[in-house]
């Protein structure tokens, strides 16, 4: 479970996140949507204990992020938007390090690593260095490492980046299965179609404020729109796309 | 003793060992050059090469 109570964050005079009160139940897949710079990654960093809030509180998996950060970290998996990997290690070695960091006994870690590599179709490449991996293969390793310790709560920040269609399907199905097991999924993405298909509930954030909360159909209704995409554009106040496109074309011709 | 020292510093001994192992491994590999597909990384360890070289030189210099 994820609970926030007036959680906020300021960077100097800029407010990255206005007080946010939110509750995500076990088994729920929350899609956290917003334009670039809206405060999505700041929220994830606050919830994972990577940065401290300016005010308010957050509880993840039953523990306060500020007072029990290690207990929180033991229970969460995190797929960041741009993950750094130890590229001179092989996929197997990298996952062994992750297993060690989570205190997995080596016998069960070996079994778990083989299982994850197999699920992500990486068994044949497990002894290749990560520097030789494609972007999609590296992303699979990042997702596998987030699942290594069977987290109760999973934070996914653009998890499908770089994945081919087959791998993306596997990950989407995996997310649904993990939620069905009672795990809480916090899913950040710019890709509205994916969020609409995967998430049971959506929160839209804009300029650091949560401006909509509900099922995809409810959000569309809130934005007086026929689809989530139209509602997103209406709610976030994005400029008319055809006008922006024309302005860009005009600029190229000058 | 190391464990006691680490614990006193609030450092997790298991994690510390895992990270030291991985950084040493990466350090040796970085100096060993880029890896080719299918190449055995352990065979190119500079430490391994240095040890073999030392044994060889000390043997022929007798």
Image (cartoon, helix red, strand yellow):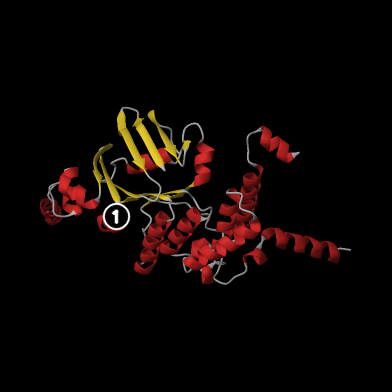
- Taking A178 as reference, is B12 above or below it? above
Question: Horizontal and vertical percent for residue A52?
Answer: 43, 33
- Taking B34 as reference, is A233 above or below it? above
Q: Residue at x 13, y 56 (%)?
A: A249
Label 1, on which residue?
A195
Res. A163 visible in picture: no
**The image quarter in which residue B3 lies:** top right
Question: Horizontal and vertical percent for residue B36?
Answer: 55, 69
Quadrant including the N terminus of chain A: top left
Q: Residue at x 71, y 35 (%)?
A: B5
Left or right: A50 as drawn, with respect to A239: right
Chain ID, mark 1: A
- Looking at the rendered structure, the number of numbered marks drawn on it comes to 1
The residue positioned farthest toward the right in the image shown: B62
Report the front residue among A117 and A163: A117
Q: Residue at x 59, y 70 (%)?
A: B39
Res. A86 visible in picture: yes
Left or right: A4 as drawn, with respect to A143: left
Report the front residue among A20 and A40: A20
**The image quarter in which residue A213 lies:** top left
Question: Horizontal and vertical percent for residue B21?
Answer: 65, 51
Question: Horizontal and vertical percent for residue B57?
Answer: 80, 63
Q: Residues within 10 Å of mark 1 (few under 14, many from 20)?
A: many
Element class at badge 1:
helix
Left or right: A206 as drawn, with respect to A23: left
Left or right: A246 as drawn, with respect to B14: left
């Amino acid at each position: 479970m994820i609970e926030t109570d007036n959680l906020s964050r300021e960077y100097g005079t800029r407010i990255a996140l206005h007080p946010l009160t939110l509750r995500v139940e076990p088994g729920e897949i929350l899609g956290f949507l917003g334009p670039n710079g809206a405060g999505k990654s700041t929220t994830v960093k606050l919830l994972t204990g990577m940065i401290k809030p300016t005010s308010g509180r957050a509880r993840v998996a039953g523990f306060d992020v500020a007072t029990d950060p290690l207990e929180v970290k033991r229970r969460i998996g995190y797929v960041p938007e741009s993950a750094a990997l130890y590229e001179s290690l092989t996929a197997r070695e990298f996952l062994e390090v992750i297993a060690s960091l989570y205190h997995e006994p080596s016998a069960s870690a070996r079994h778990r690593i083989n299982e994850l590599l197999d699920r992500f179709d990486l068994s044949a490449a497990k002894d290749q260095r990560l520097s030789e991996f494609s972007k999609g293969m590296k992303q699979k390793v990042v997702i596998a490492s987030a699942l290594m310790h069977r987290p109760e709560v999973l934070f996914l920040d653009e998890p499908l980046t770089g994945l081919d269609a087959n791998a993306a399907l596997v990950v989407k199905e995996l997310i649904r299965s993990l939620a069905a097991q009672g795990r809480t999924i916090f899913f950040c993405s710019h890709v509205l179609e994916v969020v609409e298909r995967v998430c049971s509930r959506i929160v839209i954030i804009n300029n650091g404020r949560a401006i909509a909360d509900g099922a995809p159909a409810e959000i569309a209704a809130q934005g007086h729109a026929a689809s989530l995409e139209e509602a997103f554009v209406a709610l976030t106040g994005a400029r008319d796309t055809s006008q922006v496109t024309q302005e860009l074309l005009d600029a190229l011709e000058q | 003793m190391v464990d006691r020292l680490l614990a006193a510093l609030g450092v997790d001994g298991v994690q510390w060992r895992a990270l030291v192992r991985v950084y040493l491994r990466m350090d040796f590999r970085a100096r060993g050059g880029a890896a080719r597909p299918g190449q055995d990384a352990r065979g190119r360890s500079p430490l391994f090469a240095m040890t073999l070289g030392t044994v060889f030189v000390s043997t022929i210099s007798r």
